[in-house]
């Protein structure tokens, strides 16, 4: 298909998504997400054979949107697009500062948000390699991350927040084990872990939203970890799980001697 025509088709499709959004707020965020550079970026993912079609919006978050898309084999993939807005920039810069992997990426906000997408991609890869259950990363490009879709064609897997667990004790223990693997094998602290950023799929927790995860050597890593532990304990305590006290979890996760 000639380039111009393909681009026009994509724009058309995005207009349709916009028309289908129910609220003015939804439309506004879609307009913010699909700026011209982003549309060109999606177009690149399409010509590179990563994404064939965008199917439907899955979520509108604080700094980005997640869409269900299809690859050229017809398999669903998740496409996460960070908005290149000031709000996104302000929230993420404190995680980028102090991460040696991002030394030297000063410059435009857009560049930093692009670095953020690459950070989410790399964090997913490290976590996957460490044995943590995360969506397999497929590609990043500019402000976008493509990863495996967690769910069925009827919709994404629910978050822990929105599911009734069969065996909450086992899920609690698995989450702690993932935090341990993340810390000791991937050398990462999630830094925004809670029941909102864990999906439940095929009876196992899946950790998502890892853009802000920091290396364990980050100056604030231990504080972020403590906050993660408090969130996780709070959530599972509410399910009447027999939880470990937070110091014990900290020791288990970091492997620090008692
Ligand atoms: N790989 C995936 N497969 C299926 N659904 C996903 C996937 N990744 C994210 N989602 C869906 O999108 C939602 C938001 O994802 P995520 O937390 O990564 O984005 P976010 O922009 O940081 O959102 P928020 O600000 O709400 O935390 C998830 O709760 C989930 O419903
Ligand atoms: Mg999230």
Image (cartoon, rainbow, N blue to C red):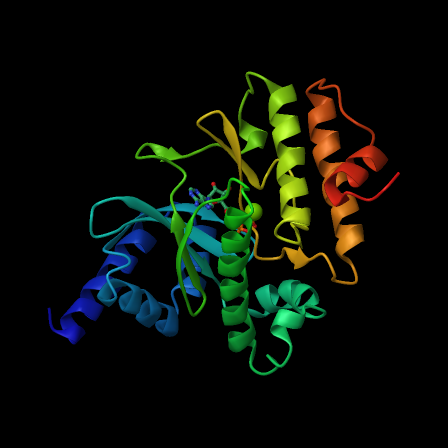
The residue sitting at 81% across, 39% down in the picture is 251
Q: Quadrant of residue 101?
A: bottom right
Q: Does residue 229 appear to the left or right of 92 in the view shown?
A: right
Answer with the quarter of the image where residue 181 lies: top right
Q: In the drawing, does residue 9 fall left or right of residue 77?
A: left
Q: Residue furthest left?
A: 1
Q: Is residue 192 visible?
A: no
At x 41%, y 39%, the residue is: 150
Q: Relative to 107, is 75 above or below? A: above
Residue at screen point 32% across, 32% down: 154
Q: Quadrant of residue 241?
A: top right
Horizontal arrangement in the rendering, residue 26 relative to residue 247 (left or right): left
How many numbered dots are placed on residues in this image? 0
Q: Position of residue 159 (x, y in %)?
A: 53, 34
Residue 162 locus on image (x, y percent): 54, 28
- x, y percent for residue 123: 55, 56
Q: Residue lying farthest right?
A: 258
Q: Which image quarter holds the C terminus?
A: top right
Q: Is residue 20 visible?
A: yes
Q: Is residue 258 left or right of residue 131?
A: right
Q: Tell me the quarter of the image containing the N terminus.
A: bottom left
Picture layout, residue 96 above or below residue 153: below
| Residue 48 position in % (x across, y down) | 25, 66
From what the image shows, is residue 178 above or below residue 203? below
């Amino acid at each position: 298909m000639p380039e111009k025509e393909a681009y026009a088709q994509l724009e058309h499709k995005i207009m349709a998504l916009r028309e289908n959004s129910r609220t003015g707020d939804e439309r506004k965020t879609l307009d913010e997400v699909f700026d011209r550079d982003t549309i060109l970026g999606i177009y690149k993912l399409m010509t590179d054979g990563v994404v064939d079609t965008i199917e439907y919006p899955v979520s509108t978050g604080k700094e980005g949107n997640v869409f269900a898309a299809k690859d050229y084999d017809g398999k669903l993939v998740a496409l996460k697009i960070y908005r290149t807005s000031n709000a996104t920039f302000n929230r993420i810069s404190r995680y980028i500062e102090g991460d040696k992997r991002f030394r030297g990426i000063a410059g435009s906000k857009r560049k930093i948000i692009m670095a953020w997408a690459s950070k989410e991609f790399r964090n997913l890869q490290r976590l996957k390699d460490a044995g943590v259950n995360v969506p397999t990363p497929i590609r990043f490009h500019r402000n976008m991350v493509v990863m495996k879709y967690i769910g069925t064609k009827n919709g994404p897997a629910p978050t822990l927040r929105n599911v009734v667990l069969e065996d909450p004790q086992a899920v609690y223990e698995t989450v702690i084990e993932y935090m341990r693997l993340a810390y000791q094998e991937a050398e990462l602290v999630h830094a925004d872990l809670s029941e909102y950023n864990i999906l439940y799929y095929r009876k196992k927790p899946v950790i998502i939203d890892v853009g802000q995860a920091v290396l364990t050597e980050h100056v604030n890593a231990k504080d972020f970890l403590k906050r993660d532990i408090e969130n996780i304990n709070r959530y599972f305590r509410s399910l009447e799980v027999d939880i470990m006290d937070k110091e014990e979890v900290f020791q288990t996760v970091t492997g620090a001697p008692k």
